[in-house]
Amino acid sequence: MKNIIITWPFSLLQLFVSAQNVKSIDSEKTKIYIIGIIHSENEYRNSDSLLNILKNLKPDLILDEGDSTASFFSRQYLLSKPPWWYSVGRKFRLLRKMPPEVEVLFKYKEFDENVKNLPFDKMIKNKKEFSKLYFKSERKWYSLLNSAFSKGEIPDSLTNVHVTYMTYNNWLHNTFKKSYKEINNPKVIDSIRQFQEIEAKYISILTASNQLFREFKTWLPLYRNFWFVRNEAMANNIINFTWVTNAKKVVVFTGLLHKPYLIDLLNSYNSEHKYELIEYFEN
């Protein structure tokens, strides 16, 4: 796969790398922990449980699924303090709480002030608008799908595939409610891979054969292509940030659905075995 070329801000290099003492990551095998997260919290899954994981692993680099446009990072990719308006907004309950994987960065910084925090996602222009349009289209897709099935508009030849697809969807919805330990189970990751394969085939058949879904025929391939490009950029950023910071123990917080892709990409890039990729973080 084609690697993404990144132009690094000079201030980042100046801060993290000494020109006289740059070590390659092959001098000692780096450990990279991929931890799938959900961008919301509940009683089983919150910043305190992530903090316990970090205290156990003691990373020297934490990579967060954000980009340099996020409010909590400066343009030089550095973690900054939450802006004043965040505290005010939270006090009056005008703003949602920051995601647990972001909140824990500030908590762990108090435990280890030397830890480096960097955002590794692909930069998305007009990210809020992009997300808004995506979720609107996703809701419409599932609404059409449920309506078509209840009205008997799904061909009999696709009934079994439809039932399997929706069963996986419901399973995934319930899985999202569980703890970090449970959602990072290798069996869950394998099931997500299976779900994504079924989804790709089913969507392709439906949009090609059923008039109800024709409006998605163009949108879905474009989104899937963006999804692959985004994951590839994320994987390259993980490697590049690991190198530029000379990190020996890296924790990557990524959305659970990204995890199978990142595992596969990072394994494919590791032909020289320069790092050890650790999929699961608890016994």
Image (cartoon, grey):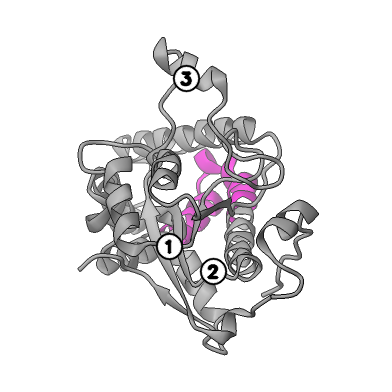
Q: Amino acid at mark 1?
A: Pro
Instruction: Name the quadrant of the C terminus.
Output: bottom left
Alpha carbons under labels 3 and 1: distance apart? 28 Å
Q: Position of residue 126 (x, y in %)?
A: 69, 34
Instruction: Residue at 42%, 55% (x, y): give it.
Output: 257
Alpha carbons under labels 3 and 2: distance apart? 32 Å
Alpha carbons under labels 1 and 2: distance apart? 8 Å
Depicted 203 relative to depicted 147: above or below: below
Q: Which residue has dot 1 on it?
A: 59
Q: Main secondary structure of the magenta part?
A: helix
Image quarter of residue 196 = bottom left
Considering only order in the chain, which callout, 1 or 3, is on the residue closer to the N terminus?
Answer: 1
Contact (Cβ within 8 Å) of mark 1 with mark 2: yes
* Dot 3 alpha-carbon crowd within 10 angstroms: few under 14, some 14 to 19, many 20 or more: few
Q: Which residue has dot 2 on it?
A: 247
Q: Secondary structure at mark 2?
A: loop
Asked whether residue 214 is drawn in magenta, I would say: yes
Contact (Cβ within 8 Å) of mark 3 with mark 1: no
* Dot 2 alpha-carbon crowd within 10 angstroms: few under 14, some 14 to 19, many 20 or more: many
Q: Which residue has dot 3 on it?
A: 87
* Dot 1 alpha-carbon crowd within 10 angstroms: few under 14, some 14 to 19, many 20 or more: many
Residue 35 versus residue 129: which sits nearer the camera? 35
Asked whether residue 196 is drawn in magenta, I would say: no
Instruction: Residue at 54%, 72% (x, y): give it.
Output: 265
Q: Secondary structure at mark 1?
A: loop
Residue 10 versus residue 43: which sits nearer the camera? 10
Can residue 65 be seen from the camera position used here? yes
Can residue 164 be seen from the camera position used here? no
Magenta stretch in the rendered image: 199-224
Instruction: Residue at 47%, 32% (x, y): give it.
Output: 140
